[in-house]
Image (tube, rainbow, N blue to C red):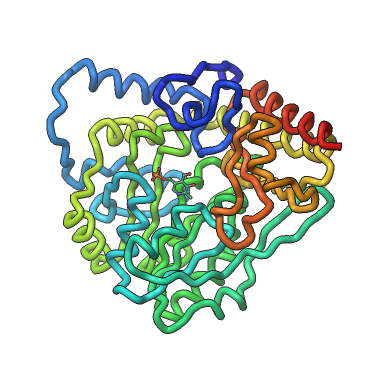
Amino acid sequence: MFDQVINRRNTDNTKWDLYGPDVLPMWVADMDFLAPPAVREALRAKVEHGIFGYQFPPSDWFGFVCERLERLYGWRTTPEMVVAVPGVVAGFNVAARAYCEPGSSLLIQPPAYPPFLQVHENAGLQHRFAPLTETAHDSTLRYAIDFDAFEAAITPDTRLFLFCHPHNPTGRTFTPDELRRLANICLRHNVIICSDEIHSELLLGGATHTPIATLSPEIEQRTVTLISASKTFNLAALFTGFAVIPNGELRRQYRQTVERLALHPNGFGLAAAKAAYTQCDDWLRELRAYLTANRDTLVSYVREHLPGIRTTVPDATYLAWLDCRALNLQPNPFQFFLEHAKVALNDGAPFGPGGEGFVRMNFGCPRATLLEGLERMRAALEDRK
Ligand SMILES: Cc1ncc(COP(=O)(O)O)c(C=O)c1O
């Protein structure tokens, strides 16, 4: 089913419309796959009913979110702890506004998903960086946490750790031991954790995910966990996510900010999320197997045909982070591949420190599309010789 190539040009989507018709887009994080049948059916039913009135569900309506958290992780939450938001980016910006006062700082681990790097501007804050460290093995690259640097980056004005778990762009899932160490440092310095777990269900190979909030009741009480069906089930344009906040006071502050900014989720997004979380496990199992095979195809291709480039082997997500620094591509790898390979990747520079000289490649597409992109890149590098 995922091998089907579907024409997305001129269908009002940014991924395929931003560049010209000769460019293969492998950048922004949505996949070139149909959403699961049950999601499309739920949306069709809403359209066919044809009346699109306000939808402000009572809290017990969100029970399906709690059921999923319990089923996947044994994490017991209650529907009152769930706050719906119009997307995860909105969700972490709300956290910054709710918990930080102007002039205080938030902590980020670059290279980082670019909207993380804008939060401080949106909320009148400063940011502190605790970069992930890289280790290279031949053509692959792996990232790790430097815990001393993480703790040293915290200053007395640091209120919030904006955590990306699994991490975009490096594809790292973090182990319970790593999570516990990070969380304990945050608790020691009275830093609230906002954990963006949007990629947590896109697990590749045998990878597993542990929500940071599940490590201890103390950590749970200091954590806002952001989840969404949008990456996993390919529903990005429906902009719906959930903040799970077990601590009553943190939740009150969070809800107040959501209400002041009038950040209402929309009915289509809610219907799609409910169908995705309750009826699409088989689809997701197949998707993960397909993405794992795509990841493995990409990693072998880079090793065999793109000498000088190193890639991560992501544990999660459909994003590979390619280190092109050794090739010194001009004016930068993103422009080089756009002009000479006609492949649109994400430029590494906007991912902040550690992003220069990298590109991010989206492999959430039919295998034939992935291979075409890789072959275009190989040909461009060969022409350069
Ligand atoms: C880490 C991370 N958070 C959030 C988002 C987007 O969230 P939303 O579209 O729900 O605002 C993305 C999309 O790529 C992402 O990678």
Q: Quadrant of residue 63?
A: top left
Answer above or below: position of 115 versus 302: below
Q: Quadrant of residue 362?
A: top right
Residue at point 62%, 56% (across, down): 355
Nearer to us in this view, 121 or 271: 121
**In the rendered image, is residue 292 in sight?**
no
Residue lying furthest bottom in this view? 156
Image x and y of residue 172, in percent: 61, 53
Question: Extreme right residue here?
Answer: 385
In the visual, does 103 lie left or right of 300?
left
Query: Which residue is located at x 83 percent, y 33 percent?
Result: 382
Quadrant of the drawing holding the C terminus: top right
Query: Foreground residue, 82 or 15?
Result: 15
Q: Nearer the viewer, residue 66 or 270?
A: 270
- Image location (x, y in percent) of residue 69: 40, 48
Question: Along the horizontal axis of the image, is 362 left or right of 157?
Answer: right
| Residue 51 in view (yes/no) | yes
